[in-house]
Image (spheres, rainbow, N blue to C red):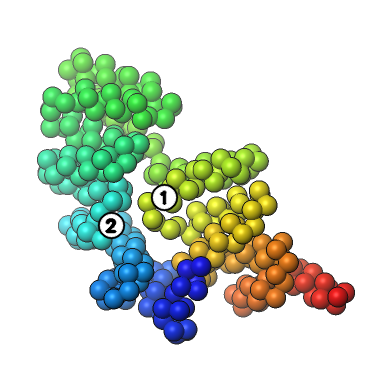
Amino acid sequence: MITVFLRRLFGLIPSDPFTEGLQRMQRGDLRGAAELFEPLLDAPDDGIRKMARLYTCEALLQLGDRTVDEDPVAALECYESASGLQPTFADIHQRIGRIRLAHDDPVGAVEAFDRALEINPRFFGARLDALQARVEMGRDDCEAVLEALETHAPPLFHDEIADARRELEADDPGAALVRILAMRDRNPEPRDRAKERAIIALQDGAPLRAIELLERMLDDGRRFPDLLHLLGLAHGALDQHESAERAFREAIAIHPGYTKARMNLALTLMELERYAEADAQLNDVLRCDPHHPLALSALDEIRARAGGN
């Protein structure tokens, strides 16, 4: 759907700004990608502006992540610019808070973490960060933050949170901080956690659970190609081929070189008996990987069917 949308918007131009920008992102030229996306932020079409905000934001986030250790000031500028484009992305506010906390701005850090939690109250990593900032500041509202942390914590952290509570009650904030930082280091990012749980659900034969996890992660408008690919696989496992097709096509629209998604789109089209479309997708796969065994096998099957008709 988005592929058709973009092609109509840009009049079938072979290298539209979005495609070229995404290719630059894949090559690691994040600044160049952002520079291609940014002029489209003022485009007259609302659909283009929405896509430009999303992709410019992602380029800035990746650029900030790349530079945060060497140049935190530049990274903070990237994150704040990204936040201006997508103010409801909780993880951007968490990134801002972490830089501020590490560079002697605990008040600004608490504001950023609290904003992240307003957007997503289940954001466990931001709750750990919010508690860390308050403990370091010696604030008297740590108890309320601890209670919320316990409410939203995965079960494997319950004992450690209880230990942190006892250490704070014993007026030993240093020990509590060590424990909080250890929990933070063990806590995966929400996207990685959602992806891992969805893969496990698919492996366990629970595609409905995988769909639930993935759609929750994709709800905020951020369209990650790898999560969309998994969503397509989950729908395919339920024989929901039209939904699978939509997910695979959206993944490819964002990442045209995503061979796995294109291969699975072709297989889905074969399930729908749309063999000419499948043939075209398989040939696109072979242009990237001329010896792709599954693509060659699927093409043989399509041609055998055509020969039998």
Work out whether 283 lies above or below 248: below
Tell me which amino acid carries mark 2: Gln
Name the amino acid type tagged 1: Asp
Q: Is residue 77 left or right of residue 24?
A: left
Residue 115 makes an appearance in the image: yes
Q: Quote the CA–CA distance across marks 1 and 2.
A: 14 Å
The C terminus is located in which quarter? bottom right
The residue lying furthest to the front in this view is: 45
Residue 199 numbered tag = none
Helix, strand or loop at mark 1: loop
Quadrant in which residue 260 is drawn: bottom right
Q: Residue furthest right?
A: 308
Which residue is at 51% across, 43% downward? 212
**Which residue corresponds to the image point at 35% horizontal and 72% vertical from the top-left?**
48
Residue 300 rendering spot, x and y as whole percentages = 79, 72
User: Where does label 1 land, which residue?
Assistant: 219
Q: Is residue 170 above or below residue 18?
A: above
Query: Which comes sooner in the sequence, label 1 or label 2?
Result: 2
Q: Which residue is identified by label 2? A: 86
Neighbours of disc 2 within 10 Å: few (<14), some (14-19), many (20+): many
**Camera-side residue: 98 or 48?**
48
For mark 2, give the secondary structure.
Answer: loop
Q: Residues within 10 Å of mark 1 (few under 14, many from 20)?
A: few
Front residue of this view, candidates 6 and 294: 6
